[in-house]
Amino acid sequence: MPHRIGVLKSGRLVEEQDTVELIASPQSEHPRMLIRSAPRIREHGDVSTKP
């Protein structure tokens, strides 16, 4: 996993920070929306699209 992540929206950088910090506490709405939309892997390998 990379140490830093940049999030683009329409070709423009909207947020860039440490990977762990960005996933734990995104500062803008676009990264929050992307993180919420990512599938979750549960304990037994089941995949869910709900948090």
Image (spheres, grey):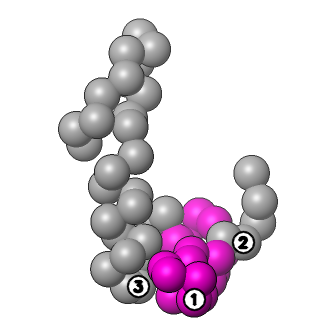
What's the distance in space between the residues labelled 1 and 3, CA to CA? 16 Å
Name the amino acid type tagged 2. Arg
- 29 magenta-colored: no
Q: Quadrant of residue 29?
A: bottom left
Label 2 environment density (alpha carbons within 10 Å; few <14, some 14–19, many ≥20): few
The residue pinned by badge 3 equals 27
What's the distance in space between the residues labelled 3 and 2, CA to CA? 14 Å
Residue occupying the far right of the picture: 2
State the residue in front, 27 or 34: 34
- The part of the chain drawn in magenta is 6-22
Please indicate, yes or no, whether residue 5 appears anywhere in the rendered image: yes
Q: Name the residue: 77% across, 60% down.
A: 2
The residue pinned by badge 2 equals 4
Please state the horizontal and vertical placement of residue 38, each as a whole percent of the image.
Answer: 40, 46
Q: Is residue 46 left or right of residue 16?
A: left
Q: Name the residue: 63% across, 66% down.
A: 19
Query: Which of label 1 and label 3 is nearer to you?
Result: 1
Q: Quadrant of residue 49?
A: top left
Residue occupying the far top of the picture: 44
Name the amino acid type tagged 3. Gln
Please state the horizontal and vertical placement of residue 24, each as a whole percent of the image.
Answer: 45, 65
The disc, 3 or 2, on the residue closer to the chain's N-terminal end is 2
